[in-house]
Image: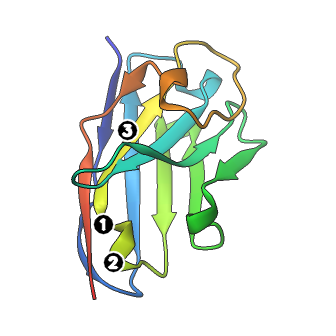
Amino acid sequence: QVQLVESGGGLVQAGGSLRLPCAASGLAFSYYAMGWFRQAPGEEREFVASISWNGGSTVYQDSVKGRFTISRDNAKNTAYLQMNSLKPEDTAVYYCAAPGSRYTDTRTRPASYTYWGQGTQVTVSS
């Protein structure tokens, strides 16, 4: 049974930083690409960042480029989203996700992911 568990969310002032870990179990983590998405109230879930199975490539939504960094630690079965220079518009529930197949490159569409975490709330105050 695959489980993805996000943590690290909270309330932060604009300009601050947060790091979101996503702990994976039940899958051979080092063989899977990982993605981060977010969903604000009344909005659709949107892509934030993705990292390929081998960590060799990453892709970001334009609005977070230069501020957010996705990474992975295969020894800990954990993916991370480092968020710096946070803005109020970054407020959302953040989800990590994994595709259903091994050895995939980065993916930006929610439909490309099979496994999802429960989400962690990030609130950025102005």
Measured along the vertical axis of the image, is residue 126 above or below residue 108? below
Measured along the vertical axis of the image, is residue 8 above or below residue 118? below
Image quadrant in which you'd find residue 55: top right
- Mark 3 secondary-structure assignment: strand
Quadrant assignment for the C terminus: bottom left
Measured along the vertical axis of the image, is residue 112 above or below residue 118? above
Label whose residue precedes the other's in the sequence (2 or 3): 3
Task: Say if residue 8 shows up in the picture.
Answer: no
Quadrant assignment for the N terminus: top left
Q: Give the amino acid at mark 3.
A: Ala
Dot 2 alpha-carbon crowd within 10 angstroms: few under 14, some 14 to 19, many 20 or more: some
Residue named by callout 2: 88
Marks 2 and 3, how far apart at CA: 26 Å
Residue named by callout 3: 23
Left or right, 80 with reference to 31: left
Can you give x and y, in whole percent of width and height, for residue 39 in the image? 32, 49
Can you give x and y, in whole percent of width and height, for residue 64 in the image? 56, 66
Image quadrant in which you'd find residue 51: top right
Residue at the (63%, 22%) spot, across then down: 31
Q: Nearer the viewer, mark 2 or mark 3?
A: 2
